[in-house]
Amino acid sequence: MVFAGEDPVVGFDINAERIDALRVGQDSTQEVEPKDLTAATGLTFTSEPSDLAGCDTFIYCDGSNANHGGQTTGFVAFAECVRDGRAYSEKR
């Protein structure tokens, strides 16, 4: 959220229902106030890896890793989405 005020930010999640909720200001984790989500004009949300093609900086956040012995499956899946999004961009 803090970066969305200065630069365009793309929020990505593989869960399309979560993305739909965030788009209308609903955060199921209750970490961000609805008014803050809707006021962040530089923030967009997507569940499509191809939408990551124009991004050049990535911040990966997954609180569940801390609770599962440091497993990296979520990060690997995210890295594959980034790779797939960039491959999509290169094909166009």
Image (cartoon, rainbow, N blue to C red):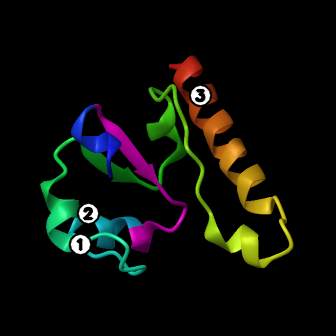
Residue type of the residue flagged with mark 1 = Glu
Are there few (<14), some (14-19), or many (20+) residues within 10 Å of tag 1?
A: few
Residue type of the residue flagged with mark 3 = Arg
Identify the magenta region: 7-18
Does the residue at mark 3 contact the one at mark 1 (Cβ under 8 Å)?
no
Residue 77 horizontal side relative to residue 59, left or right:
right
Residue 23: mark: 2
Closer-to-camera residue (32/16): 32
Residue 86: mark: 3
Does the residue at mark 1 contact the one at mark 2 (Cβ under 8 Å)?
no
**Which of the 4 quarters of the picture holds residue 42?**
top left
| Of pointers 1 and 2, the one earlier in the residue sequence | 2
Distance CA(mark 3)–CA(mark 1): 32 Å
Q: Position of residue 8 (x, y in %)?
A: 30, 34
Q: Which residue is mark 1?
A: 33
**Secondary structure under the numbered disc 3 in the rendered image:** helix
